[in-house]
Image (spheres, rainbow, N blue to C red):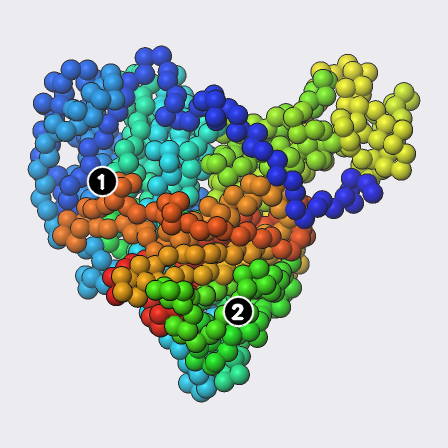
Amino acid sequence: MTMAEAVPAALGPGVDRVDGRPKVLGAAHYPSDVTLPGMAHAALVRSTIAAGSIVRLDTARAADMLGVLTVITHENAGRLQKGKRNLFFPPPAAPLQDARISYHGQYVAVIVAETRQQAAAAARLIEVTYDRDEPVLTLDDAAASSQSNPYFIDMKRGDAKAAMATAEVTVEGTFTTSPETHNPLGPFTTVAQWHGDTLTVYDSTQNPFHVRAVLAASFGLAEDDVRVLSPYVGGGFGAGLRSWPHTILAALAARVVARPVQLSLTRPEMFTGVGHRPSTMQRLTIAATRDGKLVAIDHEGTSTASMGHEAPTRKPPTRKAPLQSLLKAPDEQPYPITAGTAAAYACPNVAARDKRVRLNIAPIAHMRAPGEAEGNFAIESLLDELSYELGMDPIDLRLRNYAEVQPQTGLPWSSKALRECYTVGAERFGWAQRDPTVGAMRDGRWLVGYGMAGVTFNHYQAKCHARATVHRDGTAHVCSGATDIGTGTYTVMTQLAAEVLGLPVDRVEFELGDTRLPQAPQAGGSGLTTALGSAVHNTCVALVQRVLTLVSDDADSPLRGCTIEDVVAHQGRLQHADDESRGETYSEILGRHGLSELTVDGDSAPSRAEAGVIVGSLVVSRLGRFGRKLVGASHATVPAGGFGARFVEVRVDPELGVLRIARIVSVNDAGRVVNEKLARSQIIGGTVGGIGMAIFEETVRDPDSGRVANATLSDYLIPVNADVPDIDVVFVGGPDPANPIGVKGVGEIGLVGVAAAIANGVYHATGRRIRSLPITIDKLL
Ligand code: MOS
C-alpha cells in the first residue's frame, strides 16, 4: 500500500491532548492571562434601557476617580468605520457612534484606568439620563416587524399544500424554543496594543481573520497592519464566530491612552455582549399515508434578531443569487431553522422557510447547531406524534421514510450510515423492551419514558490554508491561523500531519492562533477539522513531494526518481512501498542537500466553492430550488452530511413534576473519527448542551425593561453533574469520500436530537406533549 492508497482506520486512537500539559501547568495563556508592560484596564458601562436615546451623560465623577485615565463615550469616541461582513458573519455595529439605544446592555461608555478594579469602580459613577421609548421585546409582540424569507434559503419541492389537502393523516404543531446564552467558561477578553499605526490584539475568538477584517475597517487600516492572536480560547459554542463591539472598544481605548489595554467582560456582560441563541417559533405540519409514508411537510421557522444593530438591509438578498447577495447585505445573520428539513426524509412534497422578527434585544449569534437544533426538535417531536397516530414504532416510521439519496437533489450522499445509527442505538439502548403504551412503564413512583430522535446534520467545509516545515533534526512544524476553542484542534492536526509525514506525534508541533499564519476559516459550523485537516493533509503531502523532488535526480538517494505513489513515510523516513530497506530519513536528505529545513504552503477547498465557501448539503439543498442543472453542472458537488440517533430514558415524578434524564445513547455517523477520545468528548459535550436546551436553559428577559434577569451562572441554569447520566457514545460509519481525511465534524451534531428524544420520552412517560423548551417542572404539573 502506498501513501496515495492508504485508507486510515475509521476510528482513530485516543491520543491525549497535546495542549493538555501547558493548560494544566498554566503555561497556556488565554487572552485574560496576557499582561503587557504598562497595560491599563478598561471597564464598560451598559445601557439600562432597551430603546430610546441618551439625553445626558455625566462622566465627571468617574473621570476624577483615582487611577482613571480616560472616559470614552459617543461624545468623544470619534468616527469608527463599520467593517465588512463575510458570508455568515456580519460585523458588529460600530460602538459609541451616537446617542441611540436599541437594546438593554448596549455599551454607552468605556473607562480606562490603571487597574481593573479602578475601572470597574469608576464605571459605577457614570450617570446616564435616557429618553426611553417603548421597547419591542417578544416574538409575538404585535409591534414586532416580521420579515419573511430574509435569507432566501427556503426550500421547496413538489406541492406541499396540494398534498396536504388529500392526505390520509395529518399532524401539526406550534413549537417554541427559548433564548439561550453560550457561557463559555473563559470570559471574552481583548488585549489591544498599538505600535504606531499597527495594531496587535489578543482576543477570545473563533474567527480571528474576521476580527482582523473588522478591526482594520474600524480604524481604516490595512488588514496586514492588524495582527490577531488567539492561541488559547476558553470555549466558544459560537459566541466567538462573530466579532464584537468590546474588541473594537479595547483597541479604541488603547489608542486613546497610548498604552496596551485589557478589556475582560464580566459574566453579566457575556449575556449581552457576545450573542445568544435567539428564541424561535415554528409552525409545522406533516402529512402521511396510513401506512406511514410521508407525503408532505410544511415547516415555517421564525427567529428573533436585534433591532437597529442588525438593521434591515437596504438591498435585500435576491432569489437569483442568494449567497452572493447575502455577501452584500451588511447586517444579515443567517439563522436557518428549517434548513435541515428538506434533507432529512424522503418526502415528495416539502415547503420550508424561515422568517425573522426584530426586537430590542442584544445581537444574536450562532450557538452550537444554530437553527438546526431547533428545527430538529420540531420535526422529530411531530414525527413521534405521527407514530402514535399511526400506531407505528417511531424507528420504523423513520426507516420507512429513509432518504437513500439526498432528497432535495436526488444526488447520492457522499456516505450515510443513519440506518446503523438507528439499529445500533436501538440495540444498545434496549428499545425492544419499550412498551409503547403511554404511562405503561413505571419504576416505583417514577413514570418511565423511552424517547428517540433521528438527526440529519449539514456538513460544511470552507477554504483553508496551511504551512508545513520539516527540519533537519527530523521534527516538523505545521501551522495555520485557526483557533482551538477546546475542541482538540491542536491535537487532531498534529495527528493528521504526523500520519502523512510518517513521524511520531511528539516530533510534530502544530501552531495556530495568529493571523500572521496562513489563513483559516472560523472554528465553527462543525467544519474546521474538515477544512483545516484537509489543508494540513494536502500540505504535508505536498511537503513529501517536495522532498522527493529534491532527490529526483540525486544519484546518492535510494529514492531517486520516486513519486509519492511509490513511497510510504514511516518513523521519519521515506521508503519504497514494496521494499522498506530502500529509503532514507528526512534528516539524511536535508543534510546531504545542505538544507536546515524545507517548507511548503498548501490549502484545501470544498469540492465546489460558492462565494468562497464550501458547500455541504445545506447549499446543495439551497441550490436544489434552482433545479438540478446547477448542481449537476459542477459534478463535484456531493451532498454530505452527518447523521445520528438519540435514545433517552426519562423519569418523571407525576406528583412533583420532577424530570430526570436516566440514560442516553448517542450514535453518530461522523465519518472517520481521527481521535476517538476527543470526538467522544465533543459528543458528550454536545449531549450535555442538548440536555440544557431540553430542560434547563433559558435567558430570561424582564418584559418591561428588556434586562436579562438571570445573567449569572447561578441564575442561568445549565446541567450539572447530577443532571447528566452516563452517556453511551457510539460511532458508526466510516471515512467519508467528500474530503481527503474522511471526516464529517463532531462539534455540533451531538446536541441535535437530544431535546426531541427527551420530549418524546416525556410523552411516553406522561402523555404530555411538550412543544415548548425548556421542559420545566411547571409544564409537567
Ligand atoms: Mo458553532 S455555533 O458553529 O461555533
Residue 43 placement: quadrant: top left
**329 with respect to 779 (left or right):** right
How many marks the image carries: the answer is 2
Q: Nearer the viewer, residue 111 or 292?
A: 292
Q: Secondary structure at mark 1?
A: loop
Does residue 504 appear anywhere in the picture?
A: yes
The residues bearing labels 1 and 2 have C-alpha atoms spaced at a distance of 53 Å
**Type of amino acid under label 1:** Gln
Query: Badge 2: few (under 14), some or many (20 or more) residues near its Cα, within 10 Å?
Result: few
Residue 8: % across, % down: 71, 44
Residue type marked 2:
Gln
Q: Is residue 601 left or right of residue 221?
A: right
Q: Tell me the quadrant of the picture where the N terminus can be found.
A: top right
Determine the secondary structure under disc 2: helix
Mark 1 CB near ligand 1 (8 Å cut): no
Residue 189 on image: x %, y %: 35, 30
Residue 121 percent location from the top left of the image: 17, 24
**Residue 598 against residue 679 in the figure, above or below:** above
Q: Position of residue 663 (x, y in %)?
A: 47, 56
Residue 525 visible in image: no
Q: Residue at x 37, y 57 (%)?
A: 660
Q: Residue at x 56, y 32 (%)?
A: 17
Q: Residue furthest front?
A: 444
Task: Tell me: residue 347, above or below residue 4.
Answer: below
Nearer to the camera, 100 or 217: 100
Going 22% across and 40% down the picture, which residue do you hit? 106
Taking 159 as reference, is 276 above or below it? above
Which residue is rendered at x = 67% and y = 48% of the image? 10
> Residue 276's mark?
none
The circle on residue 106 is: 1
> Quadrant where the C terminus lies?
bottom left
Q: Which mark is residue 433?
A: 2
